[in-house]
Image (tube, grey):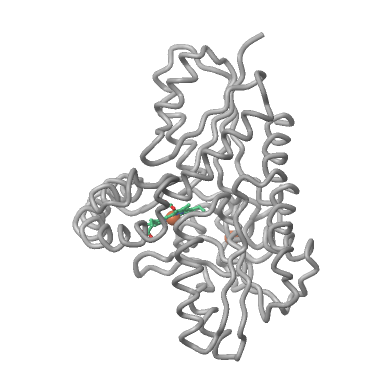
């Protein structure tokens, strides 16, 4: 019988928090035409001329703040734990490799290891619960580009999204239990943002996304691949599981880059609004991420925490990501075995 493999792919993180390594990472990441989807000349000017020189030193400081002396980048640390735990669960039936879309371990090196191991069946799981062209779509592109050069192709499958995966929802709910969600003034579901034009581009029908103010807030057949609609659905499922009433939570989008409109509402504006309304405590879920990373550990806890407190709020509590929770590893195992 042929050998089977699972390739877990997350976004990527710099090799170290030095400005030089952060610049290299940002250059590779942001030069991806699926991430900054503008014409190539403008993208090069923007990334090489503006973002890499000015953002790299700023981002490096943020990475230095979250970099653990022993385990390094949280994204890498938890991704490695996920790989090891899944390998243990699947045993000798599968080889489980971890790759990052940008930087290391590269998708190329992981595929080469699988090639050397003579695998003839690869399941690629892009570790983004909600589909976006800039994340999952880009992983597809890279894997296909590399496989173009293989004389003999393996059987290959991709997990397109898992925004409603029962185990993923259950893990977020379980992680929140210890904070007693009902004791917080308000709950946020803060997803990574996306330029609005990318939602519109991804709309097969070209008749749905952003055509009305609330069209991406409900998942239907017409918008089943829409990042915003899938994000709303994930949040609604977690809220249902925890019996959080509709008026007690807000779905919002963080990490905007540049001046173009991104998916709204922006987390920062919601945090300010809630503080002004007199809310004192916020519990924040970040269900676009399967592992804690800069965007959860720093942006939510420190940046939004500081903003909330400066406006009179008292407490912003992050619900940990899926990381290596056994319930999440169960879900991954099930995803692989049932695929
Ligand atoms: C959830 C999936 C992600 C999507 C979709 C996504 C789109 C996207 N991101 C940027 C710009 C940046 N993102 C950065 C960090 C970052 N992004 C994701 C995930 C998605 N991004 C993760 C998991 C992380 C954290 C990585 C880590 O090392 O911890 C950064 C770098 C950090 C910073 O400088 O703020 C940038 C820049 C764009 C432009 C975009 C969509 C078009
Ligand atoms: Fe990002
Ligand atoms: Fe949409």
Image spot of residue 74 (x, y percent): 47, 50
Question: Quick one: 231 or 114, which is closer to the camera?
Answer: 114
Q: Where ligand 1 lies, by image quadrant? A: bottom left
Quadrant in which the C terminus is drawn: top right
Number of marks in the rendered image: 0
Question: Quick one: 337 or 193, which is closer to the camera?
Answer: 337
Image spot of residue 59 (x, y percent): 32, 60
Q: Is residue 161 left or right of residue 11?
A: right
Tell me: residue 238, above or below residue 37.
below
**Residue depicted at 71% across the width and 51% down the height:** 164
Tell me: residue 281, above or below residue 285.
below
Q: Is residue 57 left or right of residue 327?
A: left
Image spot of residue 280 (x, y percent): 61, 85
Quadrant in which the N terminus is drawn: top right
Image spot of residue 41 (x, y percent): 22, 51
- The quadrant holding residue 232 is bottom right
Tell me: residue 263, above or below residue 337.
below
Tell me: residue 289, above or below residue 141.
below
């Amino acid at each position: 019988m042929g050998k089977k493999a699972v390739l877990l792919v997350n976004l990527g993180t710099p090799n170290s928090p030095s400005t030089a390594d952060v610049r290299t990472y940002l250059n590779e990441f942001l030069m991806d035409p699926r991430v900054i989807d503008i014409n190539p000349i403008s993208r090069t000017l923007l990334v090489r001329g503006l973002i890499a020189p000015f953002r790299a030193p700023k981002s490096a400081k943020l990475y230095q703040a979250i970099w653990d002396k022993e385990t390094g980048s949280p994204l890498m640390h938890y991704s490695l734990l996920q790989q090891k735990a899944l390998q243990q669960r699947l045993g000798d039936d599968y080889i489980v490799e971890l790759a990052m879309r940008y930087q290391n371990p590269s998708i190329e090196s992981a595929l080469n290891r699988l090639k050397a191991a003579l695998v003839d069946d690869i399941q690629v799981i892009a570790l983004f619960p909600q589909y976006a062209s800039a994340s999952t779509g880009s992983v597809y592109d890279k894997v296909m580009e590399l496989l173009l050069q293989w004389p003999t192709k393996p059987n290959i499958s991709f997990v397109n999204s898992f925004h409603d995966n029962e185990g993923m929802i259950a893990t977020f709910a379980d992680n929140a239990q210890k904070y007693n969600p009902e004791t917080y003034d308000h709950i946020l579901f803060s997803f990574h943002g996306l330029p609005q034009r990318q939602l519109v581009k991804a709309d097969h029908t070209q008749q749905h996304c952003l055509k009305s103010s609330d069209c991406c807030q409900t998942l239907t057949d017409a918008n089943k691949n829409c990042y915003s609609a899938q994000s709303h659905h994930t949040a609604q499922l977690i809220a249902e599981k925890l019996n959080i009433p509709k008026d007690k939570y807000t779905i919002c989008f963080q990490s905007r880059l540049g001046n173009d409109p991104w998916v709204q509402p922006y987390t920062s504006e919601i945090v300010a609004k809630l503080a002004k309304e007199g809310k004192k405590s916020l519990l924040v879920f970040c269900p676009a991420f399967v592992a804690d990373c800069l965007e959860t550990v720093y942006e939510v806890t420190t940046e939004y925490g500081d903003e909330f407190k400066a406006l009179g709020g008292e407490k912003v509590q992050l619900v940990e990501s899926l990381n290596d929770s056994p319930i999440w590893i169960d879900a991954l195992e099930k995803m692989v075995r049932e695929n």
